Structure formats: structure tokens, C-alpha cells
Image (cartoon, coloured by chain):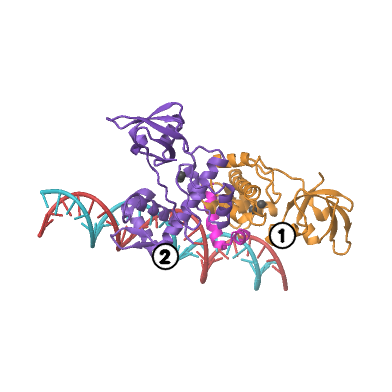
Chain colours: A purple, B orange, C cyan, D red
DNA sequence: CTAAAAATTTAGACTAATCTAAAAATTTAT
DNA sequence: ATAAATTTTTAGATTAGTCTAAATTTTTAG
């Protein structure tokens, strides 16, 4: 059994490993967990002793199979709770992350299984992130960035890469909702901003910064 | 802001103070929290420093107003989550306490308020225990024990005093469900066991041990 | 009312998680 | 290829919560 702290480290290692390529560095972990590098080193030794990570001094860190399984269980719980908070309790998608950070540490297999059933076995969380399987596998999504879509293409908004309140509220104000169908009508050659038509209705302006953080697929 | 541990001590002090009369003893707390008396003493000093309890060495302990308010907030969260687990996720009433022990420590006013609304502002948890108000007051229930009911009286099952799995499952098997109306048809003079007729239908045998742990009211 | 028993507190130690400052290893740049 | 810069680890402390063993206070009983 792991502590809250150990679970948070495992989750963070998972995220960083999938953000960059190869081993995760001590400093990157220190920044993400808002601790100091010295503290991270101590924890890495502990996780290595428990066989949850591969760790050689000065060489960075990588999850073992068991470590990845545990990390994905935590992420599964996090994302299921986020679905609950949005779908059942009516929270906005910008408000749920903080609360899910706490709920994710309630470890009861039975609870997670029943919550999953209650929510209708969702495949994605409110931000479009895939929910890991009970067995501990992260589903692949073939999403690409809106900034990579060609003019005239008709795609479906699926996920956000940026989770900040400001970004999510900006999307709300622009009527850009996950699940909605958009057509790229124009791409500005200079600043790469795009105009998209939402659900064959109104057209909205999307800056390159925003388009880079929106994931879509082709229905 | 209190730690999980501090919240658990406050809650335990509240329960013990309302179980007996007067101050709560160090040993009673040690037993309830499954720690040693020496550890309790350390924590009592800390809670006293934070003005959450009245504490004089060797004299036992009592919650301050602020301490009681916090204890009741924890109990409110615990009981609301128990309602959620039974009503929404379909857990049996014997299975929810353990999980609620963890969920009760997720501190988000907004979460508790929304959960309360979502559940329909319940007044009682699955065991018939009253849910404290958001302001931190414990509602009074005028319940009395089934063992104190006279022959011929018609009452409603409202709560259990004993929360063990064995007891709760025994009630399930006897078709004794909270909310159901029972009439005492006979009281055995020797062992104080009673016969009750459930919902004007079948009659079941209730031992004195069980009757002492069932609370009822007169509709 | 004293002496034994019981309850409580103190003293000193341990673990988990963190920190700062200093040392060591690795990477980068001349 | 060496020196400088950066990253990482070690050393030594700190805090929360816990423990055992010993000391102290309160309660109970003769
Ligand atoms: Mn999140
Ligand atoms: Mn999310
Ligand atoms: Mn309970
Ligand atoms: Mn209960």
C-alpha cells in the first residue's frame, strides 16, 4: 500500500514520461510536485526500494510495470471523479481538478467499480482525457491538434491540452464545447489563427495559441 | 486547517462526549483511535493550543465551540457520503462506513453543498443518524429504544445504535428495515425479547440485545 | 487516611516527508 | 579537453504523528 505522497509521485512520473521522451529528471519532478530536488531524491530511493521505479543515481527515473499500473489506477480514479463532479454535481470543468486531486486517493476497488458503472462506464473525462482501464492500460486516442487541421476539414472537438481555468473559461465564452463539430473555414497565413464554423452555425475566431491546445478527430 | 488526524480526534471526542456525560478521558480516546495514551496526550496539547478543546492535565477534555463546529462538519461529510454510497452507488449499509471514513476528509465547502443538494438534502444517514446542519448543529431526534416500547404500540423503525456488519446483516435477514412500521405484539417477561409485526404483515422475533439497539419513534 | 492500583503525562526515540547548504557528478561551452 | 555551469545527491535538521518505558498524579480500597 502506498501513501498519498507516493501515489502523487508515481502519477507525476507517468505524466512527465509521456510528455517528454525517455527518463524523467529529478528537477522536473521537483518542479511538478512543488518540492525541492533533495526531497525528490529521497523519495526516488524509496520508490526504487519498493520496485515501483527504475532508478540509477544521476540517470533519471522510469516506472516499472507495477509502478505504471499503480499510476494508472490513480489517474483512473482522478478522471472518474472528475466525470462525477461535472456530470452529477454540476461543477464547471475548470473547478474539478483540485477536488479530484483529493478524491483520487480514496482506495477502494469496490468504490471505483461502482462509480464507473454509475457513470455509465465513461471513456473520457470532462477534459477529453481517456480514462485508463480497470486493468491499468491507458487507451490510445488518435486525436490531433486543431492547429494541424487543413482548411475545409470538418472535425469534432475532443480534448484540451491546457487545463488552466483561464483557458477553459475562454473556450466556454467562445462556445467551443467538447463533442461539438467544427469546420475550419480559414487559416491566417501570418499568425496561423483559424476561423471555425461551429455546428454549421456561427463562426468563431481561434488564435494559434488556442488551436494548439485543442484536440480533434475526424468523426 | 486541520490534518486528517486532527479531524479524527475531534470527531472521536465528539462521539465520546455524547456517549457518556462530562469530560472525555485520555484512555477512552486511545482505545477509540487505536493509539496509545501517550500519543493522545501529545495530540491533546496540540488541539488545546489551537483552541479546539478545553484541556487541563489529568482532567479530561471537552470540545470548544469551534472544536464542536469542526467535528460536526466532519460528521456531516461522513454521513452525506454514506447516503451517496447507499442511495446512488447501491452499497449495502454495512459496507459504507469504512469508505466514508476516507471521503469525510475531502474538505471542499462547494463539494459538500452540491452533494447535499444532489442527494435531496437528506436529514438522516443510512443508519438513521441525523446529518448535522451546514451551520454545525446536530439535530435532535426524539427516538427511543424498541426495548422501551409497550405491548400494542405501533412505531416506526428509525435508527440503529450498533453499526457492526453482523448486526446490520441480522436486521436485513429479519426484514427489519429503517422506515418500516412495526407493532409490538408481545413482550417476553423473562428475557425481554419482543415479537413485532412488520407492516401489518409477518411477525418476527427480536431478542432484547437487538431491541436495545433499534431506535423508533411514534410516527 | 494511607497504600496500592489505575490513569495520565513526560522523556526519549523512530519514521515519513520535507527543507537548506554543501559536495559530487554530469553536461555545456570555450 | 579543460573549465564553468547545471544537475543531482548527500549531510544534517525539522515537523507531525506515533511508540515504549519511566515518572507523576489521581482514584480506589482497606
Ligand atoms: Mn484533473
Ligand atoms: Mn481532467
Ligand atoms: Mn459511519
Ligand atoms: Mn452512519
Number of disc labels? 2
Identify which residue, A66 or D10, lies in the foreground.
A66
Q: Quadrant of residue B94?
A: bottom right
Question: Where does the C terminus of chain A fall, quadrant-wise?
Answer: top left
The residue carrying mark 2 is A50
Regarding residue B135, the answer to whether it shows in the image is no
Report the front residue among B130 and A179: A179
The residue tagged with tag 1: helix, strand or loop?
A: helix
| A214 is within the stretch colored magenta | no
Coordinates of residue A63 in the picture (x, y in percent): 38, 59
- Circle 1 marks a residue in which chain? B
Magenta segment's dominant SS is helix
Span highlighted in magenta in the image? B27-50
Chain ID of residue with mark 2: A
Q: Residue at x 34, y 35 (%)?
A: A150
Q: Quadrant of residue A217?
A: top left
Amino acid at each position: 500500500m502506498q501513501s498519498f505522497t507516493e501515489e502523487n509521485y508515481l502519477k507525476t512520473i507517468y505524466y512527465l514520461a509521456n510528455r517528454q521522451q525517455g527518463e524523467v529528471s529529478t528537477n522536473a519532478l521537483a518542479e511538478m510536485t512543488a518540492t525541492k530536488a533533495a526531497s525528490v531524491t529521497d523519495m526516488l530511493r524509496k520508490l526504487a526500494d519498493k520496485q515501483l521505479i527504475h532508478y540509477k543515481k544521476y540517470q533519471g527515473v522510469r516506472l516499472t510495470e507495477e509502478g505504471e499500473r499503480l499510476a494508472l489506477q490513480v489517474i483512473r480514479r482522478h478522471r472518474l471523479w472528475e466525470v462525477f463532479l461535472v456530470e452529477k454535481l454540476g461543477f464547471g470543468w475548470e473547478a474539478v481538478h483540485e477536488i479530484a486531486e483529493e478524491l483520487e486517493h480514496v482506495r477502494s476497488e469496490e468504490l471505483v467499480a461502482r462509480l464507473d458503472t454509475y457513470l455509465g462506464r465513461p471513456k473520457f473525462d470532462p477534459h477529453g482525457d481517456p480514462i485508463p482501464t480497470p486493468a491499468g492500460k491507458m487507451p490510445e486516442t488518435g486525436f490531433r491538434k486543431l492547429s494541424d487541421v487543413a482548411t475545409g476539414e470538418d472535425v469534432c472537438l475532443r480534448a484540451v491540452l491546457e487545463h488552466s481555468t483561464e483557458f477553459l473559461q475562454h473556450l466556454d465564452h467562445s462556445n467551443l464545447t467538447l463533442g461539438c463539430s467544427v469546420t475550419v473555414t480559414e487559416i491566417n497565413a501570418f499568425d496561423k489563427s483559424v476561423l471555425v464554423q461551429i455546428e454549421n452555425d456561427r463562426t468563431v475566431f481561434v488564435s494559434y495559441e488556442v488551436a494548439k491546445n485543442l484536440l480533434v478527430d475526424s468523426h
